[in-house]
Image: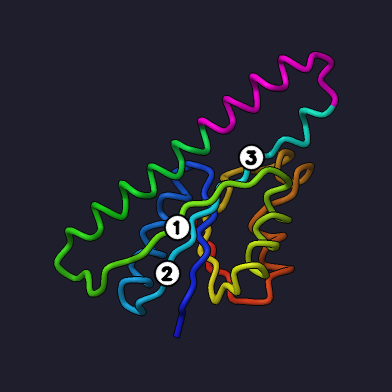
Amino acid sequence: MYKKILLPTDGSKYADKAAKHAIWIASKSGAEIIVLTVLETSSLAGLPAEDLIVKIKEMLKEEGKRSLEKISGILSEEESRKDFDNEVKITLKSKEGAPADEITNMIQEEDIDLVVMGTSGKHGLDRFLLGSVAEKVVRSSPCPVMVVH
């Protein structure tokens, strides 16, 4: 049923839980998983020092790299389980921009069949002011979206 699953990750515990669901679905369906981390750099535009922006971007890239490596580790753990049916192919990708927009763009670019993502864990005023990436993806996605809390 599913050929390509998109797994956006921010390195959070919710993203890790979503990864386990995506890996299980992929092992049962033979789907490929595209793991995406999005470096949100829009808030850096107002910073006055260019060298500070470069340093922060490097920190964000390193954090994104760790998020992607974490998913690879989760895949290795899951593959060792007895109920694991098929080998799962994963592709790791990193983008810069607004997370919801980049996730939606990736759905179109890669012809994704299913998105499996975690919630952000934000509550109250933060969620109200910033909006929920998962909510924006659910509203704009042309394919099914599984949100894991």
Q: Name the quadrant containing residue 66.
A: top left
Residue at position x 73%, y 68% from top? 139
User: Which badge, 1 or 3, is on the more N-terminal residue?
Assistant: 3
User: Which badge, 2 or 3, is on the more N-terminal residue?
Assistant: 2
Residue 19 image position (x, y, % from top left): 41, 57
Q: Which residue is mark 3?
A: 39
Residue at position x 73%, y 56% from top? 101
Position of 142 relative to 57 (above/below)? below
Contact, mark 1 vs mark 3 (Cβ under 8 Å) = no
State the SS at label 2.
Answer: strand
State the SS at label 3.
Answer: strand
Contact, mark 1 vs mark 2 (Cβ under 8 Å) = yes
Q: Name the quadrant containing residue 83.
A: bottom left
| Magenta range | 46-62
Residue 127 image position (x, y, % from top left): 71, 45
User: 81 and 125: which one is in front?
Assistant: 81
Spatial CA span between label 1 and label 2: 8 Å
Q: Which mark is residue 91?
A: 1
Whether 57 is among the magenta residues is yes
Q: Which residue is mark 2?
A: 32
Q: Name the quadrant containing residue 104.
A: bottom right
